């Protein structure tokens, strides 16, 4: 047993860090550091830079244009991306639809979609959740009725992240309403977002941003050849997708970066005539976060290292990573916001200022402090709520 | 990075696990507590025969030449049964002090005897006024001709009541809390002027208050150079005890799951209630995070950079301490009334973990050390 990284892994980390330093455009880095989410064009530009280097599809094998990295290298890569304030590669493309295509698609589908997903020529989104099917995904109702070579799709999806940016959507639809079990009778289809009959309606989040959407399907015609895997076996595909590459879900690098940022700002911000970083309560909170980060880091290393031995099998322990990882994302974003104090509150002023060409109301770090805190309340809801993760642990690990 | 056990480590773990599960039922443990020294003399011999008592001792001194990870594996197994024997006191704390500070002749005299189980060591450092401050030492040592004479008192000395030799810290220069001026000595358990008052700690393991009045001591290591050794001994102790706490957590978690499956209320097993299931999942998460931190501690015991080592041991102490508190409090709560009773094991594990948290800097103390370094 040796918990230290090998020399090769340390060298790899340095290589990734150097590449990010030398190739990430400064304005993209700065926006991320200040707490603004990556814009669509930032994500596209950066993913194409990575793709040129052969790194965009960081979790893919070489035969599909990935770098063929080990689980440890993938973990290091993601961590460096987040700690370096680079946009994360688009998960819909790389860790969701990509592996599904590799596992289930026809050669023709693979040849067309995989290179485009890698280079972000297509922006993918995920059409899973519905108004009546959240954590209970199998109760979805959006219907696809066969009509010759096409399915006619009717229904509604919700919480569809970045659907307004998307070129394609992978959608779970009900193809057999009479199936005995709800999990049967579902199919997994690929829908071109330009198809007539699709309406995307924004849902503005509590941080004021447009990230989520409702997507309406009104007699949308989808070629049968855009179905992945067998008809009525889409649940198998969905399970594969959701069980795949879950170790990245902790987003540990982001929390580490946010803690460093909070401390950096706390050296600048003053209270009682001293830098906030000298305040004992601040220091104790930072210390507790450091403890929790270290524990999660070790647990993540254990899960990644076990994964080396048993590839392709979802590890229920990744539910621990999801729960603790999202708790830390929430805690660190809250910590950053709290450093700002009252200056973190005038969020809407940013938009007013932009409209009237007035100078910003305060320091450049202030306006985007509360946004990530607000948005990350979703972290314990998306990707299977943290309560669902506990149900998974209950069944898969505890045997209750 | 590799979390796999070597073949030797697997064998070690299995053989201890077998020995303990054959001999350390809850009722048997009660019998051992009633023995003269508060532990099983017979099992102590068996540990020696297995080579366990020489585990972290170099092969040239009759040991097994194992490292902190081996100690971690053994301590975890001890934790599962709440073993009472003075392995930690003698083989981890005492032997580490001798290994780090002893002269060649001291090492070749003492370590083989420790490995054989013939000599038991104890580490007598803490004092009543010191709380968790490891520099706060009032016990003095003064030179008298060629000999050193010690005066003072040591507190909560683990297995100090039965130790054949004690490693005692004393002030040879400087004021009460000076980091310099601390020196280690070997003191014979039967030395004249040494008095000990043994007692059981809350968890049933043995410790003692020790008073020293004009006691002759043998210099162990450099005069005024004791603190660096004391730190490392305590760090090794934190790592070992952290692994033991993980073993206790495993036992409590398993007992709780078992209870949830069998205890019926309102016509069904209480484990069918989601509120109970989520509490059990939370216990699992805390236990695994605690285990990660115990692994971290084991890994850092041998770290050469003193500051890095101390910092990571503090992180681990807080992590294991908080996990232990969560798991043990949940275990009692989820058992309900039976968890409150002396006749049921869960409360004993609870007290073992509680004891761990209060030795060598509690959670708040180590969190404070980490906070001091925030930059």
Image (tube, coloured by chain):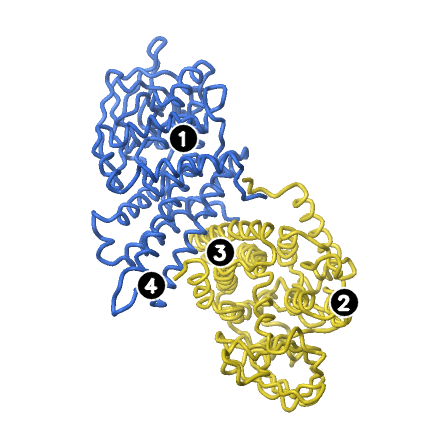
Chain colours: A yellow, B blue
Q: Secondary structure at mark 3?
A: helix
Which residue lies under the disc numbered 4? B271
Residue at the spot of label 3: A276
**Would you say residue B184 is visible in this rendering?**
no
In the displayed structure image, the side of residue B138 where residue A158 appears, left or right: right
Above or below, B331 against A177 in this view is: above
| Image location of residue B359, percent across then percent down | 34, 39
Q: Chain of mark 4?
A: B
The answer to which image quadrant residue A186 occupies is bottom right
Visible in this render: residue B203? Answer: yes
Question: Mark 3 and 1 residues: CB-CB less than 8 Å, in contact?
Answer: no
Q: Say few, some or many: other residues with alpha carbon within 10 Å of mark 2 (under 14 / 14 to 19 / 20 or more).
A: some
Q: Quadrant of residue B149?
A: top left
Residue hosting label 2:
A115
The image shows residue A225 at horizontal and vertical percentages of 72, 79
Q: Residue at x 43, y 66 (%)?
A: A391
**Residue B371 — which label?**
none
Q: Are marks 2 and 3 in contact (CB under 8 Å)?
A: no
Query: Which residue is found at the position 34% from the left and 40% from the top?
Result: B21
Does the residue at mark 4 contact the one at mark 3 (Cβ under 8 Å)?
no
In this picture, residue A42 sits left or right of residue B332? right
Mark 3 vs mark 1: give the one in front. 1
Mark 3: few, some, or many residues within 10 Å (few <14, many ≥20)? many
Q: Are marks 1 and 4 on the same chain?
A: yes
- Distance from the alpha carbon under mark 4 to that under mark 2: 49 Å
As measured in the structure, the alpha-carbon distance from the residue carrying label 1 to the one carrying label 4 is: 40 Å
* Residue ID for mark 1: B92
SS under mark 2: helix
- Disc 1 or disc 4, which is closer to the eye? 4
């Amino acid at each position: 047993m040796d918990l230290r990284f090998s020399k090769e892994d340390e060298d790899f980390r340095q290589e990734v860090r150097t590449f990010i330093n030398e190739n990430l455009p400064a304005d993209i880095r700065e926006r991320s550091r200040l707490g603004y989410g990556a814009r669509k064009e930032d994500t596209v530009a950066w993913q194409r830079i990575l793709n040129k280097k052969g790194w965009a599809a960081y979790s893919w094998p070489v035969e599909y244009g990935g770098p063929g990295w080990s689980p440890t290298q993938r973990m290091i890569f993601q961590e460096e991306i987040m700690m370096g304030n680079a946009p994360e590669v688009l998960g819909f493309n790389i860790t969701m639809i990509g592996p599904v295509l590799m596992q289930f698609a026809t050669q023709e589908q693979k040849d067309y979609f995989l290179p485009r997903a890698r280079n972000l020529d297509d922006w993918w989104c995920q059409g899973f959740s519905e108004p009546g099917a959240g954590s209970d995904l199998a109760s979805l109702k959006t219907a696809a009725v066969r009509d010759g070579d096409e399915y006619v799709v009717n229904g509604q999806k919700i919480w569809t992240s970045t659907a307004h940016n998307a070129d394609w959507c992978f959608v779970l639809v009900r193809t057999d309403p009479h199936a005995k079990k709800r999990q049967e009778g579902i199919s997994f289809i690929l829908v071109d977002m330009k198809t007539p009959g699709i309406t995307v309606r924004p849902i503005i989040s509590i941080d004021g941003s447009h990230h989520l959407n409702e997507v309406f399907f009104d007699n949308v015609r989808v070629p049968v050849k855009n179905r992945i895997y067998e008809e009525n076996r889409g649940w198998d595909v969905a399970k594969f997708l959701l069980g795949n590459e879950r170790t990245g879900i902790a987003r540990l690098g982001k929390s580490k970066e946010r803690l460093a940022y909070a401390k950096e700002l706390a050296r600048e911000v003053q209270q009682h005539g001293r830098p906030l970083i000298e305040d004992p309560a601040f220091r104790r909170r930072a210390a507790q976060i450091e403890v929790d980060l270290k524990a999660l880091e070790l647990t993540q290393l254990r899960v990644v290292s076990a994964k080396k031995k048993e590839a392709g099998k979802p590890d229920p322990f990744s539910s621990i990573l999801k729960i603790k990882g999202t708790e830390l994302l929430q805690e660190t974003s809250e910590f950053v916001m709290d450093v700002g104090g009252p200056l973190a509150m005038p969020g809407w002023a940013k938009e007013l200022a932009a409209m009237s060409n007035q100078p910003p109301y305060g320091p450049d770090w202030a306006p985007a402090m509360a946004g990530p805190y607000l948005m990350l309340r979703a972290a314990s809801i998306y990707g299977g709520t943290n309560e669902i993760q506990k149900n998974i642990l209950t069944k898969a690990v505890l045997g209750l | 990075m590799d979390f796999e056990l070597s073949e030797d480590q697997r064998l070690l773990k299995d053989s201890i696990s077998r020995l303990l599960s054959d001999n350390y039922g809850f009722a048997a443990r009660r019998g051992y507590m009633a023995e003269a020294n508060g532990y099983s003399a017979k099992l102590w011999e068996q540990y020696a025969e297995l080579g366990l008592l020489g585990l972290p001792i170099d092969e040239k001194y009759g040991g097994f030449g194992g490292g902190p990870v081996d100690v971690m594996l053994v301590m975890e197994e001890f934790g599962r049964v709440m073993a009472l024997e003075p392995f930690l006191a003698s083989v981890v704390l005492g032997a580490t002090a001798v290994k780090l500070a002893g002269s060649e002749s001291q090492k070749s005299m003492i370590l083989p005897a420790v490995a054989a189980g013939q000599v038991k060591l104890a580490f007598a450092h803490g004092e009543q006024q010191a709380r968790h401050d490891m520099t706060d030492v009032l016990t003095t040592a003064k030179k008298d001709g060629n000999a050193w004479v010690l005066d003072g008192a040591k507190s909560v000395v683990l297995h100090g009541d039965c130790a054949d030799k004690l490693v005692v810290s004393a002030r040879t220069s400087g004021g009460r809390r000076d980091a310099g001026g601390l020196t280690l000595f070997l003191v014979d358990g039967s030395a004249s002027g040494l008095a000990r008052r043994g007692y059981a700690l809350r968890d049933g393991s043995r410790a003692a208050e020790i008073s020293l009045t004009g006691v002759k001591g043998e210099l162990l290591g450099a005069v005024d150079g004791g603190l660096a050794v004391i730190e490392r001994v305590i760090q090794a102790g934190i790592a070992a005890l952290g692994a033991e706490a993980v073993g206790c957590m495993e036992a409590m978690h398993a007992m709780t799951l078992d209870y949830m499956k069998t205890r019926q209320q309102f016509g069904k097993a209480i484990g069918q209630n989601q509120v109970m299931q989520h509490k059990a999942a939370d216990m699992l998460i805390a236990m695994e995070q605690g285990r990660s931190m115990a692994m971290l501690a084991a890994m850092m015991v041998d770290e050469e950079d003193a500051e890095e080592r101390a910092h990571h041991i503090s992180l681990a102490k807080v992590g294991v301490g908080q996990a232990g508190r969560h798991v043990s409090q949940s275990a009692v709560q989820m058992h309900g009334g039976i968890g409150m009773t002396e006749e049921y094991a869960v409360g004993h594990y609870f007290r073992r973990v509680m004891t761990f948290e209060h030795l060598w800097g509690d959670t708040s103390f180590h969190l404070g050390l980490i906070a001091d370094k925030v930059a």
